[in-house]
Image (tube, rainbow, N blue to C red):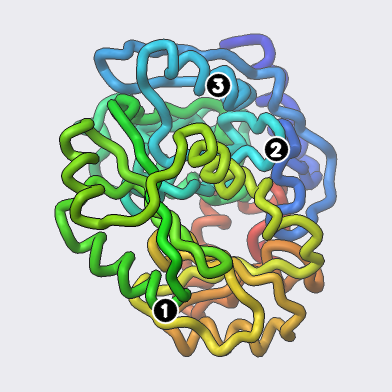
Amino acid sequence: MDAILQDLGARIADAHASATPLRLRGAGTKDFYGEQVEGELLCLRAYADVVDYEPSELVITARCGTPLSQVERLLAQHGQYLAFEPPAFGSDPTIGGVIAAGLSGPQRARAGAARDFVLGAMLLGIDGKALHFGGKVMKNVAGFDVSRLLCGSLGILGPIVEVSLKVQPLPRAQQTLCFDLSADQALSAFNRWNSQPLPISACAWHDARAWVRLAGTESALRTARERLGGEALEPERASQWWLSVRHQRHAFFEGAASLWRLSLPSSCASLPLSASPLIEWGGALRWYASDLPPASMRKIASAAGGSALHWRGGAAGARFHPLSASVRGLHRRLKQQFDPHRIFNRGRLLADL
């Protein structure tokens, strides 16, 4: 076993024996996400490098501390990428942090979520020993898929020290079209277009303007442009706009003391809120800068069949949408199995975990 991994394992085993909480951290780019936790810092950034990558197999395996930029640069050299477009928030997260957070970018509605690209993972258990889940090919993923369960767990089940991800070829061509539409007009159009065989990779709306990104062959894009119409954007401007949304550098996200992330059915009409949203994923993800009380915001989201996450601002212990009793019970049982002394990121996801 690698010396760095041995040291991490020894620290975990000691912490478990003394019931000492550990605060897992990679690059720290998502320290704001979830509840704040206390405990001894366990930095995972030193355990880094790409372990295995064969472009023809469309799979990459990397250690947790590997910077996202390193992974993306290597993939780009071979004409490939992470299709779930993980957000970096203006910095350079580690690949372990990317999977622990489980966040996806503008292409999520078409390509899938981060968890859909996880083939296998290695976790350090409470005894400091490595636990292997899944594999490096789809046929190894059978039964209860723990490797995907870890995606979005925010480290409460233990440190994800290695991960194997499915990658995809870069699109041959891309084109962004813009339309002057109201929010409801855009939502109706997004749902209509996404039900058709069109090469749409992302849809977004903000400030009376709808943005639709096409990806595929030149002939497919040409046919889609003829059917959809709209204003075709210059490639550099389009790329910068999508990157600003993906990494939250867009002006909408700046300065909002209280920012909400609502997950809703894409067909849901505009919500009864005075604030104008930024809409992603064809209507399934909606951002609101709003000082509305959490109970009111969550009541509105629940009535629409969705949930509301207090992304930024708000009181401690109330960032995530409340879970049903059955789902909360499942979380508790999983935590008990993986981490009975609750030493890993205690309270990061749920206050009682």
178 shown above or below 27: below
Local SS, label 2: loop
Which quadrant of the rendered structure holds the N terminus?
A: top right
Disc nearest the viewer among 3 and 2: 2
Is 291 on the left or on the right of 89, as rendered? right
308 shown above or below 37: below
x, y (%) of residue 159?
A: 61, 36
Disc nearest the viewer among 3 and 1: 1
Is 186 on the left or on the right of 15, as rendered? left
Label 2 Cα crowd, 10 Å radius (few <14 / some 14-19 / many 20+): few
Label 1 Cα crowd, 10 Å radius (few <14 / some 14-19 / many 20+): some
For the residue marked with disc 3, what is the amino acid? Arg
For the residue marked with disc 1, what is the amino acid? Asp
For the point 61% across and 85% down, the residue is 273
Choose between 56 and 90: the one closer to the eye. 90
For the point 42% across and 55% down, the residue is 178
x, y (%) of residue 73?
A: 52, 17
313 shown above or below 126: below
For the residue marked with disc 2, what is the amino acid? Gly
For the point 33% across and 11% down, the residue is 54
Residue assigned mark 1: 184
Residue 321, quarter of the rendered image: bottom right
x, y (%) of residue 241?
A: 55, 44
x, y (%) of residue 19?
A: 77, 47
Residue assigned mark 3: 63
Tag of residue 90: 2
Q: CA distance from mark 3 to mark 2?
A: 22 Å
Disc nearest the viewer among 2 and 1: 1
